[in-house]
Amino acid sequence: MLHESLFYLWNSPNGDILEKSEWTHMFELQEFLHPGEQKLLQIIVDIAMDYHQIAAFIKRILHQMPRAEGLRELTTSTERTEVEIPDRPSGLYISAFCSGVHKVLEDYRKETIRLEDMFLQNPELSLTFILSSIERYRYLFQELLSMIHVIEKDNVHGCLLIGRLHKYVNCGMEQIETAADLIIQSINTIFYRHLCNWIIYGDLVDAFGEFFIIDGKTADENFLYPEQLIESLLDSVRKFYINWGMVPLFISEETAESILFMGRIVWIVRNDPKSSSNDNYQIKYRRDIWEGKDMEYYKKVQALESQTFNNMEFERVIEECRVKLTKYLWSVMLDEGNLTEHLQLIRDYYALGRGELFQQFITVAENHIKDTTSDSVVQNLNFIFHETARKIYGKTIRHILNSSSLLIQMCRIKWPLHIVFHPKVMELYNKLFRYLLRLRKTQIDLHKLWAEHVSGKQRIDTRVWTLRQNLMFLVNNLQYYLQVDVIEAQFSLLLKAVQNANEFEDIIKVHHEFVSNLLAKTFVLTPDEEHTYKNKHRLYQIPAIQFDVPSKVYNVIIRLLELCDEFCLVANTWNTELTEPEIEELESFQKKKRHCYRITAFYFVQSTRESQWTAPATASITARF
């Protein structure tokens, strides 16, 4: 009778789980059992209760959530629904955890059936024999309950489950290690299916918010220009980001960034805005990112789920996939994006490579906008700019000028070049453009003053002539240094680096180094010498420059240009014989010029000593001066 009741409780046919203290009250133990047998029975009951608590947790989770096999059905959906995480853990990963634990318990269930069969054959089985048969599950159940307690207490769900279970793999107890392997492999099915869909197809189907990659469901503001509509660019520049709180402990930051990077590449390539509206374009550029080997790479990633996490093997497979994708995007950049041609346009327009265009534009614009109201300045500037280009080159250009607060150039960035030439980079190019345009205008004004002095019949005061020559010498040498020693030299290095690159990340790196060198060596902004490219596998990166910190040399150069502008304006009104106030004004100009020159020379020497970025550049221009 005792044994029948005991097995009745083990199997718990009514599904009711009592407190441990209530189990012993179901028997009149004092009448039938020795105190030693009572202790043995209590241990057996404890083990049985642990089992039923684990089974109850599994039943509760699997009844409230879809099973792990449901992911295949979920992957057919293109929409992700926001689900609030309830107080108890939920999701596909916790369901997979329960499925794994259920498999672990299978051996215990077989053992109880075996004991029941033995009891039917031999009703005189002792409690000692029964305990010896199931005692090996005692510590296993305690560890499983410990896992469940942590999951419920900390609401552990999603990818974090793998990391929390990883510590049990090398705990030193073979039974627990084997159980942890079995549970992790069950969870791996979900994790690697998520991973494969993201890396291979750029799909993120995560109904319960369990994967560490998040779909922002909006356009990425880092690639969005103010004049662009968010809705129209939702697909081509969609925002995805990492939820660092969900990254498993054994996945490094660099590897997590690589995984995000790869899925975004696939998304960008598959959501080319031109391909959806142009059938001829689709035929010309019929894309196969994996070149027919998508299933091969899918299986390589999926094969990792059959083993406990191997860091070296995991990173090897991820790197193999990354290299394949980044080389493909590199080829798209060069072939479809015409990267080299776009860089040439940057040189021609933002770096004033087409000097004849901007010289004519400045000359014409100065004469036409003197009496123009501020409301129509931008419109007139654009008209003059395009007309000047048409007269010189016989064709119109795509660039336009805008002046909300400062003069900037705006050009349409083609897909997929928006990844390289994002708004922050174009902001830096516009800073350089305004600086060079400012310098070119001052140079034109000084040469115009020289032409008036040379062509005039009146004799010019020697001191005026000398000051003008000194100012022209400074501006001409500065102009030559910027255009030849910096811009042309850096642009040549950039083109060679782009030609030698074989990955997309290489293009990002060399372009940002080009922008950083350009802005630092032209003294427009201060280099950020502490900036390091911590992870080159990030889609969005910014050059190593301090955006809002002009260099000290830049401030002095601007003061010098202001001095030149003021001198040109005043010198036009001077006659052959200078009056006493004009002589004082001239001496003031000379004094300011010497002061600017001394400060500039000081900062040049200081920069040569302190900054590795600008040392060669400042040495070059100091030698010229």
Image (tube, grey):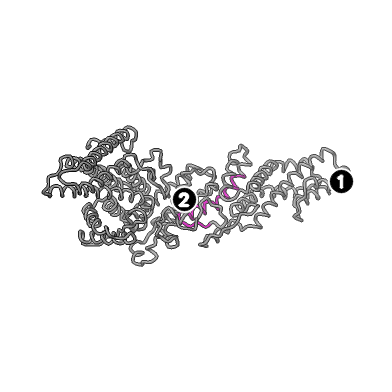
- Residue under label 2: 260
Q: List x then y, in percent, for residue 60.
A: 68, 54
**Is residue 187 visible to the viewer in this orientation of the structure?**
yes
* Residue 198 is one of the magenta-drawn residues: yes
Q: Residue furthest right?
A: 31
Based on the displayed image, in which of its 4 quarters is residue 270 positioned?
Answer: bottom left
| 322 horizontally vs 107: left or right | left
Which residue has dot 1 on it? 28
Which residue occupies the foreground of this view, 203 or 443? 443
Residue sitting at 75 percent across and 42 percent down?
A: 131
Identify which amino acid the numbered label 2 is placed on. Leu
Q: Which residues are magenta?
A: 179-205
The one of 2 and 204 positioned closer to us in this rendering = 204
Q: How many marks?
A: 2
Residue type at mark 1 is: Glu
- Is residue 490 found left or right of 288 in the rendered image? left
In the rendered image, residue 255, in percent from the top left (x then y), is placed at 47, 45
Comes first in the chain, label 2 or label 1: 1
Q: Residue furthest top?
A: 609
Q: Give x and y (percent) for residue 51.
A: 71, 48
